Image: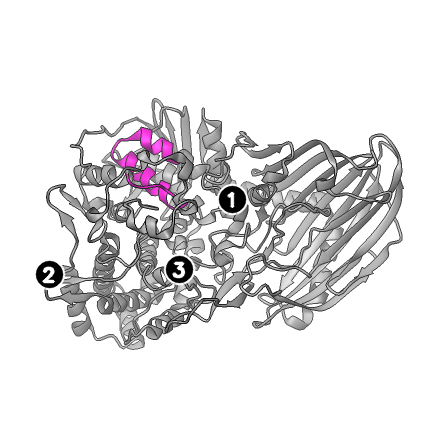
Amino acid sequence: MKKYLKSDEWLIIEDGFDPANQRSSESIFSIGNGFMGQRANFEEFYSGRSLQGSYIGGIYYPDKTKVGWWKNGYPEYFAKVINSPNWIGIDVKIGEERLDLARCKVEAFTRILNMHEGYLLRKMTVVLPSGQRVHVESMRFISMDHREIGAIKYSVLLPDTAATVELTPYIDGDVKNEDANYNEKFWNILESKAGEGEAWLLTQTKKLDFRVGVSMRYALTLDNKPLNVHPAMVELAGLSGNTVVTDLPAGKELVLYKYAAVLSTLNHPADELIVRSRQVSEMALRKGFDQLLEDHKRQWAQIWSHSDIVIKGDPEAQQGIRFNIFQLNQTYNGKDDRLNIGPKGFTGEKYGGSTYWDTEAYCIPFFVATAPPEVTRKLLLYRYRHLPKAIENARKLGFTGGAALYPMVTMNGEECHNEWEITFEEIHRNGAIAFAIYNYVRHTGDVQYLAEYGLEVLIAIARFWAQRATWSQVKKQYVILGVTGPNEYENNVNNNWYTNTICKWCLDYAGEVIDQLKSSHPAALKEVFARTDFREEQERKVWSEISANLYFPYDAELNLYLQQEGYLDKEQILASELDPAIRPLNQHWSWDRILRSCFIKQADLLQGIYLFEERYDDDFIRRHFEFYESRTVHESSLSPCVHVVLAARIGDMRKAYELYLRTSRLDLDDYNNEVHEGLHITSMAGTWMAVVEGFGGKRVQDGKLHLFPQIPQQWEEYSFRIVFRGSDLLVRVTRNGVILKVMNAPVNLVLYGQELTLQPGTSAEYPLQFRKPAVTANTD
């Protein structure tokens, strides 16, 4: 764990420069707007360790799979989000010396991410090898108001001695991915040109022919007055820009305003990219930095108005949750149903930047409760449009009759992950996609979605499960063999409890939706049956037979369901007994040793209890939580949040708070020593779940919003907003009570088990209640 960032409620602050932290800071201070993003690389040249990262949503490269041997069913490629043309570059020379922070004496350095207004600020004073002192201040943002614009304000001041300053704003297409299977570059440079005051590039991805047009324009001021300097054109094979040279008196500030436009063939015709990108950058130049920034801030104010969580009395907890919400909202905004939420978002290359089951399991709960319904609907439509590919994926593995297996990793619906034990065994992701449909409908009441799109997906998923289950002559029950559950520290297991649970639920839910649509949308149901060639009597009989007779491993002595068959054969050691020096295990132990251990990477059986909590009583939840949490090492970013929700559910607020800090500050404090690779964007939605579903007790059951707010002893109060079926509800929890305020439309809800109807514009206060933790027998 690293703690080098200052605690602040709205700012992420790095005070002082340590090159060892640079790559981590590049991740943490990343910015984006849902369409493109940028790591916190320096604008000027830097010869130290760095990962250049400029990313464009939806632009990827099919990097050919690299394995020692081929197996039938292996995907042909792994989809890589591409390091795209670098638009932030500003080369700086003072006299004859190039500004390079790795070769300077750093007198002062501060980097600030302003989460409230969405910009990155850096201030530094350095001494060059010649002894010349230089003060630099840079501010940049990617516009939330215009998805294709990035802007930079870059100032240079010489405190002591005048000198000639040379600035070269440029755009660079000669970039490569650090993560490239064959160490190849993914771009062709089609055009690289410069004109006075501008430059542009046209680039093309190899294989798939995505094209990106990037243009830049700039303006200069000296001592707050416009400065006109005739530039030298820079036109290299993959880099274009302008070089301007001016004398800079001591104490005077030279400011370069740089405006970049990034356009792609996702949204524009290929033959118009350069013309349009130049038009957009010109528009940005005309508007100017200050106006663009004001427009950008206005959009962030709107975002925070419905998604902020306020925590009083605990600055680290407040900073943590806002950092997570900030990164989620600058990764995805729901304005384009071709885009999704990569595990690293726009902050790094790891995991390919593609779509995982994380979106459905963790991100949808956040967006469905904090944003208009169409935002979540687009995430579901993304999967609906990939249904033909999901059926194709299943067909490659031998499944027939319209069965669908959604990919573990994808950009276009086609499976592109090539670790067999995950790609072909972690089939529970099918259940996450089905549950996301259910989750959306129960929150919004949008049954029309089921009729138009949802049922078709549910039928294809149910068909998969019906073929994946096997009848065991020995057990006289159906079994599911050779799977990996959410806990990836166990591979190729039989009868994983979570996988079997989600299978049973999917089969049952598909039947329930059919029955529901028979009365509400009979014509649409008939069309779905025709499109899917659905044989209702025959197929539903199979579904019911499997659901009623599915096997779940159980130990009568411990009165526990087992995570999978054979789990108790493992040596039972508690996570608390591990030496902290060997954590995380995956960085110290062999994979063989991990697989043979009892240690759990992330919530597995408990993931199923979290999803279907209303089925289980307090004692059941507590028994299983205490047994499995004590063996969980939380070495997946997706793990702590589920445990927070369940710990709060059983009244263990100490454990809930401990794990809340871990999930909310996972990246800020780098718990798993991997933030240099990028942030854990999808798990950040779990931090929201920890507060709202954990401490706030938010649930939706029987079409009603349920709340059971509790408050950690470390907090004075907290508040959050929930969008539910057209109503906007503010929930404020203090040490004395719960204040509910309805912002726009009446809402029916259940608070601490009591049904309430609240009218818009009204506010009501209720006494605070806590769940009483009970003591259970030691099951170790």
Closer to us: 681 or 506: 681
Mark 1 vs 2: CB contact within 8 A: no
User: Does residue 681 lie above or below 194 as drawn?
Assistant: above
Closer to us: 74 or 370: 74
Can residue 431 be seen here? The reply is yes
User: Does residue 133 lie above or below 164 as drawn?
Assistant: above
* Mark 1: few/some/many CA within 10 Å (<14, 14-19, 20+): many
Is residue 654 located in the magenta-colored stretch of the structure?
Answer: yes
User: Viewed as shown, does residue 75 lie left or right of 167?
Assistant: left
For label 3, the residue is 380
For label 1, the residue is 675
Can residue 487 be seen here? The reply is no
Q: Earlier in the sequence, mark 3 or mark 2?
A: 3
Q: Secondary structure at mark 3?
A: helix
For label 2, the residue is 475
- At label 1, the amino acid type is Val
Q: Secondary structure at mark 2?
A: loop
Report how far apart the C-alphas of labels 1 and 2 lie in the structure.
46 Å
**Residue 73 falls in image quadrant:** bottom left
- At label 3, the amino acid type is Leu
- Judged by its main secondary structure, the magenta piece is helix
Coloring scheme used? one colour
Q: Earlier in the sequence, mark 1 or mark 2?
A: 2
Question: Residue 486: where, in percent of width, then height?
Answer: 32, 52
Question: Residue 599: where, in percent of width, then height?
Answer: 30, 44
Q: Earlier in the sequence, mark 3 or mark 1?
A: 3
Q: Secondary structure at mark 1?
A: helix
Residue extent of the magenta highlight: 631-660
